[in-house]
Image (spheres, rainbow, N blue to C red):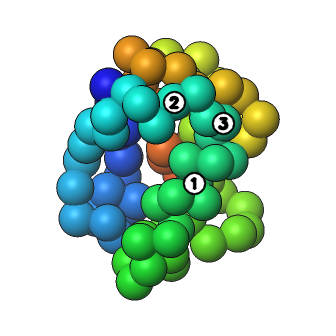
Amino acid sequence: MIRILYFAQLREQVGTADESLPGDQAPLTVADLVERLKARGGAWAEAFAPGPGLLSAVNQSMARPDTAIRDGDEVAFFPPVTGG
């Protein structure tokens, strides 16, 4: 299984805090996963539209689009954090 977590505004946009995908969909990259989520259309396509502001982590380490995802991994998506 691949566990996916959604945080902050992204969680509100897609209407869920987390989900799991079968491990047979791995290996893939963060970019591949984003494309699969966007393909759901509607709020998913809007939430994962290209542009600044979406960060990802794999197993609690910051990830790049080409970061590999394997069965058993946890992937988190979240907006950037600003301080002040």
Position in image of residue 39 (x %, y %): 50, 71
How many residues crowd around disc 1 within 10 Å: few (fewer than 14), some, or many (20 or more)? some
For the N terminus, the image quarter is: top left
Residue under the image location 77 percent in, 35 percent down = 66
Q: Is residue 16 above or below residue 15?
A: above
Front-most of 56 and 44?
A: 44
Position in image of residue 46 (x %, y %): 50, 78
Front-most of 37 and 22?
A: 22
Q: CA distance from mark 1 to mark 2?
A: 13 Å
Dot placed on the residue nearer the N-terminal end, 1 or 3: 3
Check residue 29 in the rendering and tell me which mark sits there, or answer none: 3
Name the residue furthest front: 24
Check residue 26 in the rendering and tell me which mark sits there, or answer none: 2
Disc 2 residue type?
A: Ala
Residue 66 visible to the viewer = yes
59 relative position to 53: left or right: left
For the C terminus, the image quarter is: top right
Q: CA distance from mark 3 to mark 2?
A: 8 Å
**Residue bearing mark 1:** 34
Dot placed on the residue nearer the N-terminal end, 1 or 2: 2
Residue 2 visible to the viewer = no
Res. 57 image quadrant: top right
Disc 1 residue type?
A: Val
> Mark 1 falls on what kind of element?
helix
| Dots 1, 3 in contact, CB < 8 A | no
53 relative position to 71: left or right: right
Front-most of 21 and 56?
A: 21
Front-most of 80 and 76?
A: 76
